[in-house]
């Protein structure tokens, strides 16, 4: 798969809120870097679970642009084929602007996924909503996490 193919398939899966279509796009050891958590979510089961929560949490989610190229990964600093998908959404009445950065491995699978979101107030709202969803789905323990 190429960056274009993977990014197109990823976007279609998100647009259709189709977790099943996301599964084959990730490596088994995928890392998801969130704007609300310092350490990444790791592994396909956790990342797919997180996407289940995100797809329920975002309202009026839409991609509005894309850039393809290469960039350095967070995990090992190697340069990887990459795509940046720009988006807009609403969470609990707050408008969010953001971007998804996809880093691909040699087979064209997503090995790293980074989300950037603004403004800060929306980041807090998103973080609280996602935390509640992860707890509800049994993916993380409840508490003050």
Image (cartoon, rainbow, N blue to C red):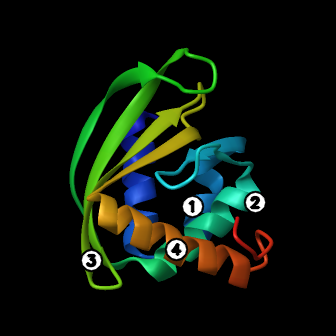
* Secondary structure beneath label 2: helix
Q: In this picture, is 118 found above or below 20?
A: above
Marked residue nearer the N-terminal end (3 or 2):
2
Position of residue 101 measured from the top left corner of the image (x, y, whole percent): 40, 41
**Residue bearing the label numbered 4:** 128
Q: Are marks 4 and 3 in contact (CB under 8 Å)?
A: no
Q: Name the mark on residue 10.
A: none
The quarter of the picture where residue 137 lies is bottom right
* Secondary structure beneath label 1: helix
**Residue bearing the label numbered 3:** 94
Residue 145 horizontal side relative to residue 92, left or right: right
Marked residue nearer the N-terminal end (4 or 2):
2
Q: In this picture, is 5 found above or below 22?
A: above
Look at discs 1 and 4 and give the one toward the viewer.
Answer: 4
Q: Name the mark on residue 45.
A: 2
Position of residue 24 measured from the top left corner of the image (x, y, whole percent): 64, 54
Marked residue nearer the N-terminal end (4 or 3):
3
- Characterize the local packing of mark 1: few (<14), some (14-19) or many (20 or more) Cα atoms within 10 angstroms: many
Position of residue 31 measured from the top left corner of the image (x, y, whole percent): 64, 42
The quarter of the picture where residue 134 lies is bottom right
Q: Residue at x 57, y 75 (%)?
A: 53
**Residue bearing the label numbered 1:** 22
Label count reads 4
Please indicate, yes or no, whether residue 58 appears anywhere in the rendered image: yes
| Real-space CA distance between mark 4 and mark 2, rounded to the nearest whole angstrom | 21 Å
């Amino acid at each position: 798969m190429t960056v274009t193919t993977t990014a197109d398939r990823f976007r279609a899966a998100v647009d259709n809120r189709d977790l099943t279509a996301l599964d084959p796009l990730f490596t088994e050891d995928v890392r998801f870097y969130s704007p609300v958590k310092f350490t990444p979510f790791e592994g396909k089961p956790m990342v797919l679970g997180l996407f289940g929560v995100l797809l329920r949490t975002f309202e009026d989610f839409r991609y509005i642009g894309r850039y393809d190229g290469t960039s350095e990964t967070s995990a090992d600093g190697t340069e990887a084929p990459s795509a940046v998908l720009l988006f807009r959404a609403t969470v609990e009445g707050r408008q969010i602007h953001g971007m998804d950065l996809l880093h691909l491995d040699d087979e064209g699978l997503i090995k790293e996924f980074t989300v950037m979101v603004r403004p800060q107030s929306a980041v807090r709202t998103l973080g609280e909503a996602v935390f509640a969803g992860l707890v509800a789905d049994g993916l993380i323990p409840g508490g003050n996490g």
